Amino acid sequence: MEQYIVSARKYRPTTFASVVGQQALTNTLKNAIDSNRLAHAYLFCGSRGVGKTSCARIFAKTINCTNRRQDGEACNECDSCRQFNENRSLNIIELDAASNNGVDDIRDLIEQVMVPPATGRYRVFIVDEVHMLSTAAFNAFLKTLEEPPAYAVFILATTEKHKIIPTILSRCQIYDFNRISTTDMVRHLMHVAREEGITADPAALNIIAGKADGAMRDALSIFDQVAASSRGNVTYQATVENLNVLDHSYYKRLVDAFIAQDVPAALLIYKEIREKGFDSQFFINGLGMYMRDLMVASNPQTLCLLETTDDVRAEMAERAGKLHPTFLYRAMDLCNTADFNFRQASNKQFLIELTLIKLCQLLGPSPDESGSDGGQMKPLQATPAATAAAAPQPAMTAEPQGQYGTRPQASMPTQAPTQAPTFHTQQRPATQQATRPAAAGAGATPSYRPGGMSLHRMQRPDSQAPQQAQPAPTAAATAPTAARLRDYSEIDLENAWKKCAEAFPAEPVLRSTLAMAAPEKISAHTYVLTVTSSIQVDLIEQYLPRLTEMLRELLGNDAVTLRVVLNEGELSPQFWTEKQVLEHILKNHPDIGEMMSKYKMRLS
């Protein structure tokens, strides 16, 4: 029976062309050989498993080849190449500095340098893990490294260049090896799978490449492990189970829960992850990286930063396109804060659960938008649609600049018919501060801010607004088109709005927001959508012209007009802070206030 050889050894590169992910560096070495411009000392630096020692051996074999091919590769037919392939070449000496790091070991190496090659032109000395040499050994090596014999070539390899003394670095040509990209690694693993007759799922190979973290040797070792456990059928599920990797489907479900503001669903998913044995810090780190990948995928210019296959890039870009950038930034910040505080937390599970609850509240009101001193959190609920019945009354005020700001959107005004109310817009100066009106009485002037504009004055339909002079109609346009003005009831409006909210199945955030915001009537056919987050304002304004047109078609009335308002006034009880809840309790239950005074209790 033929002896089994692991893939990391069986498929170790033997030519410059077979080195994965180092094309620029191998081309430089080949050009130096072709032009006969060889240095006496080289230093190959890079992380583990990127091909440093393999390139050193290929380089040593090629410079001694007596019949090199036109592409610069060794011929594998001359005596020198055959001796190298059979591991009996006397011109290539390898030293492991990790176990031979003393002065005596370097002195033995120097003695071998004095012996000229029996065959071939060069004797090549490969010192692996050279950073492990002691300071005395480095100093003993300096003179020989600086002025070796003409036939001697030194190739030093290290994973920690910063540990090598400067006098050694100054005597070498330094080559920095790159981490192997996920795409190159998956392509090579597919080649190995075909050679071995193994069925491999590209998604599974992508998981293996990510686990290897840029090291091809690690990727091949993991590939052998998964192939052995799955009996030659490397599937995505088998890879995830064998490597104990947290499947991205959990992160997708969590993001759906964040969008729907479904706190119980997020906590149950976290419980399921803990029951599978995953560490909580590993989980929160993975969630933060998934949010980072979504942020990168949301912009075509940064999509290349996503190290994965093209299919996964396309899927992530489609999913990220439905999410607001501010939501992703805040989510990454919360995950990073949880990871930073994880080690100091006494109750680590509580820390992660609290972070998940905050993530579910990102599309709700923030402290800056509520006008209160403390943070706000909505109560646990299965679906956000349950809060639609308790929608707050519109408080039409100017929107302040939030902590994170808002994404600028192009203004898309809708063309209202002559029967609709007339609005006068005025651009707000950049330095103007948003102020809250002193009282919202009957004579107060409402103020809106749709798409970055403030509507400071609003005329009622019965006001006498000056009409702009219109040019005289031509003979071809003597018959004007009559606007639709069909009467409708509140039930008709409610049913039409439900249809509008359900008309966006591919936009879960918008659908959830529309389900929570019901149109509030402010004049004959003008309605206001009151929301509690600036993110929701930006989101609805993108679709406002389409929503208005749909509502007009469903109601048969072209005078219907929609506006979006950010609520900064009195919030409904479901959005109260702990301080507001306590004030309400003390107002309605004085006995509790007396008990708190007696025992000196206070809200921390």
Image (cartoon, rainbow, N blue to C red):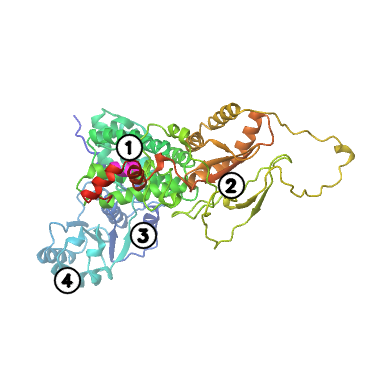
Q: Which residue is mark 1?
A: 192
Please tell me which of labels 1 and 2 falls first in the chain. Answer: 1
Read off the residue under disc 4: 139
Q: Is residue 378 above or below residue 44?
A: above
- Closer to the camera: disc 2 or disc 4? 2
Please report contact status of discs 4 and 3: CB closer than 8 Å, yes or no: no
Amino acid carrying mark 4 in the image: Asn
Do the CB atoms of the residues marked 3 and 1 lie less than 8 Å apart? no
Determine whether label 2 and label 3 are within 8 Å by CB: no
At 36% from the left and 40% from the top, the residue drawn is: 186
CA gap, disc 2 to disc 4? 89 Å
The nearer-to-camera label among 3 and 1 is 1
How busy is the neighbourhood of tag 1: few (under 14 within 10 Å), some, or many (20 plus)? some
Tell me the quarter of the image containing the N terminus. Answer: top left
In the rendered structure, does residue 159 fall within the stretch colored magenta? no
Q: Is residue 105 above or below residue 542?
A: below
Residue 356: within the magenta? yes
Comparing labels 2 and 3, the label whose residue is closer to the camera: 2
Mark 2 or mark 3: whose residue is earlier in sequence: 3
Q: Given contact means CB atoms under 8 Å apart, are the residues at marks 2 and 4 in contact? A: no
Distance in Å between CA atoms under marks 1 and 2:
77 Å
The kind of residue on which mark 3 rests is Ile
Which region shows up in magenta? 353-357
Residue under pointer 2: 442
Where residue 441 sits in the image (x, y, percent)? 56, 48
Earlier sequence position, callout 4 versus callout 3: 3
Q: Position of residue 215 (x, y in %)?
A: 29, 48
Residue visible at 24% across and 69% down in the picture: 168
